[in-house]
Image (cartoon, coloured by chain):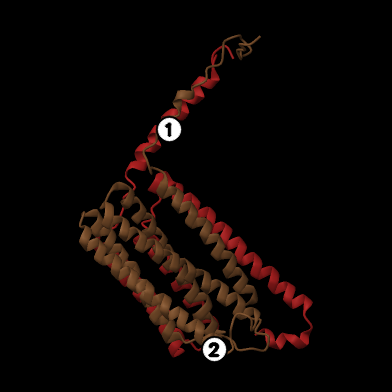
Chain colours: A brown, B red
């Protein structure tokens, strides 16, 4: 009774192929997995955009986009993020050529542009709050701060990640694992730029047109 | 059942074959652009960003709804440009699975955005007293 064999209708034993589970190369599915993460992140932003779309007209008698937004500042901010995208692209090209120092220099540039973007955004936020247009003022401002703030939080995390990877590359050089991580951050960084296109279009530009 | 005595083995063997095929596709993940393609994407992005900002800041379009359409069109084109030149999206990367995930996500995004705005707009216009409609913009 101890040894049971599973048999099919015609009596032949069923074969199981446990050893079929062969090794995958390390990190072979990382890029696809990271893409899946970005897509789910995209859904988070979609929900925040939808919230803003629904609540963006509810000023509660408070100030609207026309009184609050300064487009020149937003244009500079957009330029910062766009510059950081191209410098990260150049860093990836330098990585492909195996030039560590050039790559690190481009990454520093990327980090500085990212920092400039964040500083301008924080400056804008603090201005709004000082004008009495903080997130508690109206549903429009709550959804605005959540949407733009979530994007800013992503950029902050991207900067932390960037510095971490620069230290990693400094210590261990351009090993396969570091290249893979840098490629993931590359996708993350460019993805944030794509989200920002949505933000400056739907929030700022269309806010001014309302 | 007599012809195909062991369906398990045959299906397992088939799965093994396709898995190996995918492994080779995984190997060459580094489908980057070149310096030229990055610069091309960058210049296109600068143009596609500058035009809507210019249009809104100078008030080039008298009719706001035309301006909204133009601004949205430029945003969509710029997103595609970023996808191609910066995120290196192709229909073939990772055996087509990135494209599948992207299409699925776009469908969900469209349902979420259009659905929320559509439903809430009708809710607002049906529930609110007409006196408040002036504030709704």
Residue A190, percent from left and from top? 39, 63
At a point 27% along the width and 55% down the height, the residue shown is: A171
Query: Which one is in front, A166 or B27?
Result: A166
**Residue A120: in sight, yes or no?**
yes
Question: Does mark 1 fall on the same chain as mark 2?
Answer: no
Real-space Cα separation, disc 2 to disc 1, in angstroms: 61 Å
Q: Quadrant of residue A155?
A: bottom left
Q: Relative to A189, does residue A66 appear above or below in the rendering?
A: below
Quarter of the image with the C terminus of chain B is bottom right
Label 2, secondary structure: give it.
helix
At a point 31% along the width and 59% down the height, the residue shown is: A167
Which residue is denoted by mark 2 in the rendering? Answer: A130
At a point 28% along the width and 59% down the height, the residue shown is: A92
Q: Which mark identifies residue A101?
A: none
Frontmost of labels 2 and 1 is 2
How many neighbours does mark 1 have within 10 angstroms: few (below 14), some (14-19), or many (20 or more)? Answer: few
Residue B22, percent from left and from top? 40, 37
Q: Chain of mark 2?
A: A
Relative placement, left or right, of B116 versus A84 is right
Which residue is denoted by mark 1 in the rendering? Answer: B18
Query: Which one is in front, A88 or B122?
Result: A88
Q: Quadrant of residue A4?
A: top right
Quarter of the image with the N terminus of chain B is top right
Q: Chain of mark 1?
A: B
Residue A117, percent from left and from top? 40, 76
Residue A51, percent from left and from top? 62, 70
Label 1, secondary structure: give it.
helix
**Residue B80: in sight, yes or no?**
no
How many neighbours does mark 2 have within 10 angstroms: few (below 14), some (14-19), or many (20 or more)? Answer: few
Q: Relative to A37, does residue A111 appear above or below in the rendering?
A: below
Q: Relative to B19, does residue B91 appear above or below in the rendering?
A: below
User: Are the two marked residues, 2 and 1, in contact with CB atoms closer than 8 angstroms?
Assistant: no
């Amino acid at each position: 009774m101890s040894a049971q064999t599973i048999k099919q209708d015609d009596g032949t034993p069923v074969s199981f192929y446990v050893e079929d589970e062969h090794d995958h190369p390390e990190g072979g599915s990382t890029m696809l997995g990271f893409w899946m993460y970005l897509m789910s992140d995209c859904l988070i932003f979609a929900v925040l955009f939808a919230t803003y779309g629904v609540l963006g007209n509810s000023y509660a008698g408070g100030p609207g986009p026309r009184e609050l937004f300064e487009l020149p500042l937003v244009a500079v901010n957009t330029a910062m993020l766009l510059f950081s995208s191209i410098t990260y692209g150049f860093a990836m090209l330098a990585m492909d050529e195996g030039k560590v120092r050039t790559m690190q220099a481009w990454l520093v540039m990327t980090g500085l542009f990212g920092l400039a973007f964040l500083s301008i955004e924080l400056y804008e936020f603090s201005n709004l709050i000082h004008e009495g247009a903080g997130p508690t003022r109206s549903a429009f401002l709550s959804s605005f701060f959540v949407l733009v703030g979530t994007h800013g939080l992503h950029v902050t995390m991207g900067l932390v990640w960037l510095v971490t990877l620069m230290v990693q590359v400094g210590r261990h050089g351009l090993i396969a694992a570091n290249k893979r991580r840098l490629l993931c951050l590359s996708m993350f960084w460019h993805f944030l730029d794509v989200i920002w296109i949505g933000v400056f279009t739907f929030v700022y530009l269309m806010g001014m047109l309302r | 059942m007599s012809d195909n005595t062991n369906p398990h083995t045959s299906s397992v063997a088939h799965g093994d074959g396709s898995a190996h095929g995918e492994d080779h596709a995984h190997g060459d993940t580094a489908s980057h652009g070149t310096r030229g393609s990055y610069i091309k994407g960058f210049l296109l992005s600068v143009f596609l960003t500058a035009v809507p900002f210019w249009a809104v800041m100078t008030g080039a379009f008298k009719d706001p709804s035309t301006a909204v359409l133009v601004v949205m069109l430029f945003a969509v084109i710029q997103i595609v440009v970023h996808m191609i030149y910066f995120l290196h999206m192709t229909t073939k990367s990772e055996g087509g699975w990135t494209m599948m995930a992207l299409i699925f996500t776009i469908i969900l995004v469209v349902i979420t955005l259009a659905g929320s705005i559509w439903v809430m707009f009708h809710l607002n216009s049906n529930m609110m007293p007409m006196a408040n409609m002036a504030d709704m913009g």
